[in-house]
Amino acid sequence: RPLQAYIAELESLVTQLEEENAHLSKEQEEANQRRLKEVCL
């Protein structure tokens, strides 16, 4: 039983980190686009 609780906690953490990673990747992509526009001007 404790092992199942531990696994559930890890799965929850993985989900949280995946969402955070997606958010950060999107932010970085937007920052890269802005930088490219500045370079082109």
Image (cartoon, grey):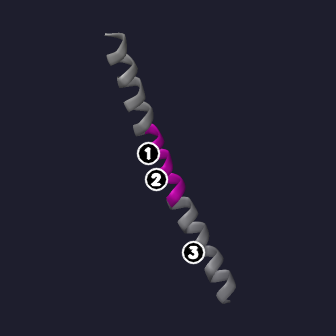
- Decide: is 6 above or below 25: above
Query: First in sequence: mark 1 or mark 3?
Result: 1
Circles 1 and 2 in contact, beta carbons < 8 Å: yes
Q: Give the range drawn in magenta.
A: 16-25
Relative to 6, 29 lies left or right: right
Q: Quadrant of the C terminus?
A: bottom right
Q: Is the magenta stretch mostly helix, strand or loop?
A: helix
Circles 3 and 2 in contact, beta carbons < 8 Å: no
Gap in angstroms between the C-alphas marked 3 and 2? 17 Å
Which sits in the foreground, 36 or 3? 3
Q: Which residue was labeled with disc 3? A: 33
Relative to 25, 14 lies left or right: left
Q: Which of marks 1 and 3 is in front?
A: 1
Give the structural element (helix, strand or loop) at label 1.
helix
| Badge 1: residue crowd in 10 Å (few <14, some 14–19, many ≥20) | few
Q: Which amino acid does label 2 sit on?
A: Ala
- Decide: is 34 above or below 2: below
Query: First in sequence: mark 3 or mark 2?
Result: 2
Q: What residue type is labelled 3?
A: Gln
